[in-house]
Image (cartoon, helix red, strand yellow):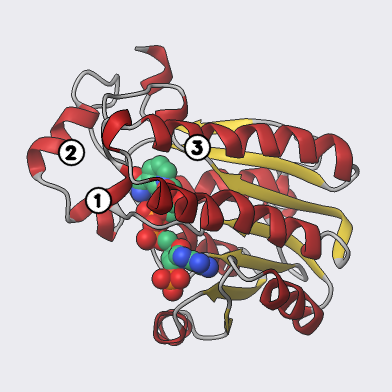
Amino acid sequence: MTDAMMSLAGKRVIVIGGSSGIGFAVAALAQERGAEVVIASSNAANVDAAVARLPGSSGFTLDVRDEAMVSRFFDQVGRFDHLAITAGDWSTTRIAATRDLDLVAARDGMAVRFWGSLAAVKHGSSVIAPDGSITLTSGMLAHRPRQRMPFVTASAAAMEGLARGLAVDLAPVRVNAVCPGLILTEPVKRMPEEMVRGYVQGLPLPRAASPNEAATAYLYLMLNGYVTGQTLAVDGGGLLV
Ligand SMILES: NC(=O)c1ccc[n+]([C@@H]2O[C@H](COP(=O)([O-])OP(=O)(O)OC[C@H]3O[C@@H](n4cnc5c(N)ncnc54)[C@H](OP(=O)(O)O)[C@@H]3O)[C@@H](O)[C@H]2O)c1
C-alpha cells in the first residue's frame, strides 16, 4: 500500500471495547494513522482512563447489552467511517465441561459478544459512511477447539458467521472479522504461565502476540477497500498446525 492508502486522516473510527487490550491498541493505532477516535465501553472509569492515555480521543460509556443505550450512542456520535468491536469479557465461569456449563453465564457472554456486536452493527449501520467498514472479533478457539471450551469455541465462531452474513447484507459497507490467537492483554497476563505455554507451544511462532500486532489486522481491514466477508487470523501460524 502507498502512504496515502495507509492513512486514516479525516476518518472517524469508533472502537467498542476500546478502553483496554486489543481495542485500546486499535484506537491508538487508528489515531496514529490520523483518525479521529471514539472509545466506548461499559465502565465509565475505564473509559476515562483510556481517554487520558490517548489524548485527543473521545470516550462514551456504553453497555452493548442494552440496545436502547446502543441506539442513543450512535445518535450522539453521528456519522463515522469505521467501527471495530472488541467488547467481550473473560469470565472463567464459561470455561467448563459441557455437563457443568453455567448456561446463565454463557448467555451473558453471548449478550456482550454476539448480541452486543449485532446491536452495534444494527444501529451503527444507519450512520456509517457507505465506503466504511466494520470489524468484529473472533478467536482461534473457533478453529482449534479445546476441552472444557465448547461455549467459547461456538461464541467465537458465531462472530465469523456474522461477519460473512453482514458483509452481503450491508454492502457496500465492508464487514470482516479478526481472529486473534493468544494476545498479551491484561486478562492473558493474569493466566497461569503453564496455561499460556499450553496455548503457544507447538505454534510456528511459539509466543503470544502484542496487542499492537493484533491491532494492525484491524487497521488493514479498515484500509483495504476491496476486502469484505473475511476473517483475518493473527495467530502465529496456529491454523497450520
Ligand atoms: N486476548 C486474547 O488472547 C484474545 C484471543 C482471542 C479472542 N479475544 C477476544 O478479543 C476481545 C478483546 O479481548 P481483550 O484481551 O482485548 O480483552 P479486554 O482487555 O478485557 O477488553 C475487553 C473490552 O470490552 C469491554 N467490554 C466488556 N463488556 C462490555 C460491554 N457490556 N459493553 C461494552 N464494552 C464492554 C471492556 O471494557 P469495560 O469493562 O469498561 O466494559 C474492555 O474494553 C474479546 O472478545 C476476547 O474474547 C482475545
- Is the residue 111 above or below the residue 198 in the image? below
Amino acid type, residue under disc 3 in the picture: Ala
Badge 3: few (under 14), some or many (20 or more) residues near its Cα, within 10 Å? many
Quarter of the figure that contains the C terminus: top left
What kind of residue is marked 1?
Val
Q: CA distance from mark 2 to mark 1?
A: 8 Å
Q: Residue at x 66, y 32 (%)?
A: 161
The answer to which of marks 2 and 3 sits earlier in the sequence is: 3
Viewport quadrant of the N terminus: top right
Q: What is the x, y in percent for residue 112?
A: 53, 58
Q: Is mark 1 within 8 Å of ligand 1?
A: yes
* Farthest-out residue, top: 241
Residue 188 shows which numbered tag? 1
* Residue 121 falls left or right of residue 45: right
The picture quadrant where one finds residue 74 is bottom right
Q: Position of residue 158 (x, y in %)?
A: 59, 35
- At a point 59% along the width and 56% down the height, the residue shown is 85
Q: Quadrant of residue 224?
A: top right
Q: Secondary structure at mark 1?
A: helix
Is the shortest distance between ligand 1 and the CB of mark 3 under 8 Å? yes
> Disc 3 marks which residue?
156
Q: Is 82 placed left or right of 170 in the picture?
A: left
Disc 3 vs disc 1: which is toward the camera?
A: 3
Instruction: Classify the position of ligand 1 by quadrant: top left, top right, bottom left or bottom right.
Output: bottom left
Residue 19 visible (yes or no): no
Q: Looking at the picture, which amino acid does disc 2 mark?
A: Val
Residue 48 vs 122, above or below: the answer is below
Is the C-beta separation of discs 2 and 1 under 8 Å? yes
Label located before the other in sequence (3 or 1)? 3
